[in-house]
Image (tube, helix red, strand yellow):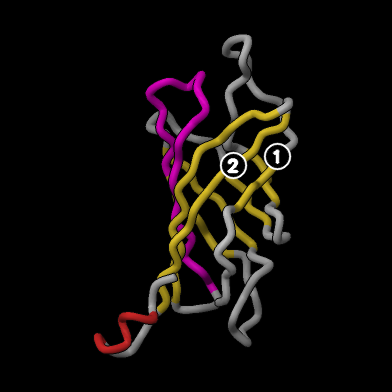
Amino acid sequence: MQVTPVLLALTLALAVPSCSAQQPCNLTGNWTNDLGSNMTINELNSKGEFNGSYHTAVKATNNEIKVSPLQGYQHVKDQCKNATFGFTVNWNFSDSITVFTGQCFVNNSKEVLKTMWLLRSHVNSLEDDWKATR
């Protein structure tokens, strides 16, 4: 799976619950990034745990791209602030896993996720470990 090292900016068009004059960002919903990948985050539980799915538009494999599951956490100490979060995607079509971490913002009434990611691919030996993480 080839993933270009970009800062993903995911945008969502959903109603946001009222907390204060400054609306908090809501992770729950459907997101699309600047590369055309799509992500769905299901409802958060009271501990800030969530799951969902990720359909990437980027790959470095001949395998057919499949929707892959994601599991994550949102920091829930203060639900009225721009949330920090992290999630893991277990790619269904390759021997790799990606972890994302980021923060949710509201910018000009538009919700934006700013994330960084780390992808780990399977290698067959310790000597090949150097090329397994991007």
Q: Nearer the viewer, residue 33 or 38?
A: 33
Q: Residue at x 63, y 71 (%)?
A: 66
The answer to which of 133 and 13 lies nearer the viewer is: 133
Q: Quadrant of the C terminus?
A: bottom left
Q: How many marks?
A: 2
SS at badge 1:
strand
From the top left corner, tell me how far across and down residue 36 is, in percent. 73, 60
Label 2 crowd bin: few (<14), some (14–19), many (20+), radius 10 Å: many
Dot 2: what SS?
Answer: strand
Q: Residues within 10 Å of mark 1 (few under 14, many from 20)?
A: some
Residue 64 included in the magenta stretch of the image:
no
Furthest toward the left, the residue is 126
- Tell me the quarter of the picture where residue 4 sits: bottom right
Q: Residue placed at 61% from the left, 15% from the top?
A: 22
Q: Which residue is mark 2?
A: 113
Q: In the figure, is residue 95 to the left or right of 124?
A: right
Q: Amino acid at mark 2?
A: Leu
Q: Position of residue 20 (x, y in %)?
A: 59, 10
In the drawing, what numbered circle is on residue 45?
A: none
Mark 2 and mark 1: Cα distance apart in space: 9 Å
Q: Is residue 128 left or right of residue 101?
A: left
Residue 78 falls within the magenta-colored stretch: yes
- Seen at 45% across and 36% down, the residue is 84
Q: Residue at x 32, y 87 (%)?
A: 128
Q: Earlier in the sequence, mark 2 or mark 1?
A: 1
**Extent of the magenta region:** 73-92
Q: Position of residue 18 (x, y in %)?
A: 62, 14
What mark, if any, has residue 12 been given in the picture? 1
Q: Position of residue 114 (x, y in %)?
A: 56, 44
